[in-house]
Image (cartoon, helix red, strand yellow):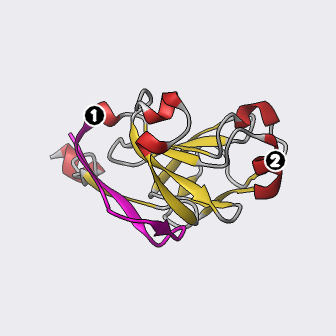
């Protein structure tokens, strides 16, 4: 009875769609030129070779973690899904240069909200790669992960993954 009164009994939808956070060319996780991502050590996901420097939220949820070096952030959905959006490879060494973070930890976000702007030209000249991994960091807590067959993606518009949490 108290659960109904205080809303604690609300069922959380176990299904979630993950949209493209960047506009560009879809890259299979196995083709990301970094073994940590390509071998799925951090989890299942995909990459995008971006054609512009803006990251939008790929899910509805909250900002869980903004890296101090501004090159990555973690998002968490209400159903427990945890997502890492990592801009480029070896971009931690840039120490925040070329990145502008538009959100803070704890912020609620919807699909399509701006999260980070970055200087694509600067990153392509100063980092190992601009290919940006999008990783489900708690893949072990999922029931199913279906990755769509996509080539080019538009940020906030193209659904890339359909996940069911366990």
Looking at the figure, which quarter contains the C terminus? top left
How busy is the neighbourhood of tag 1: few (under 14 within 10 Å), some, or many (20 plus)?
some
54 to 74, vertically: above or below: below
Mark 1 highlights which residue? Answer: 141
Viewer-proximal residue, 72 or 166? Answer: 72
Across and down, in percent, residue 118 comes to 75, 55
Q: Residue at x 72, y 55 (%)?
A: 102
- According to the picture, the residue beneath numbered tag 2 turns out to be 125
Nearest the eye: 98 or 83 = 98
Considering every residue shown, the one lying at the far left of the view is: 1
The spot of residue 65 in percent (x, y) is 59, 37
User: What segment carries the magenta color?
Assistant: 142-166
Can residue 130 be seen at all in this image of the molecule?
Answer: yes
Residue 127, x across and y down, in percent:
75, 40
Q: Nearer the viewer, mark 1 or mark 2?
A: 2
Does 58 appear in magenta?
no
Instruction: Give the residue drawn at x 69%, y 41%.
Output: 71
């Amino acid at each position: 009875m108290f659960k109904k009164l205080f809303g604690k009994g609300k069922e959380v939808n176990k299904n979630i769609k993950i949209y493209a956070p960047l506009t560009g060319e879809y890259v299979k996780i196995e083709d990301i030129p970094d073994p940590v991502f390509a071998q799925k050590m951090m989890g299942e996901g995909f990459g995008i070779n971006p054609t512009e420097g803006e990251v939008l939220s790929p899910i509805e949820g909250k900002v869980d973690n903004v890296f101090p070096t501004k090159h990555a952030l973690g998002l968490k959905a209400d159903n427990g899904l945890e997502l890492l959006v990592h801009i480029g490879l070896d971009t931690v060494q840039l120490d925040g240069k070329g990145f502008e973070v538009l959100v803070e930890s704890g912020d609620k976000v919807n699909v399509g909200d701006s999260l980070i702007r970055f200087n694509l030209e600067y990153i392509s000249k100063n980092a190992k790669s601009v290919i940006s991994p999008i990783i489900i960091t708690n893949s072990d807590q999922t029931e199913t992960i279906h990755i769509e067959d996509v080539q080019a993606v538009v940020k906030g518009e193209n659904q890339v993954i359909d996940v069911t949490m366990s």
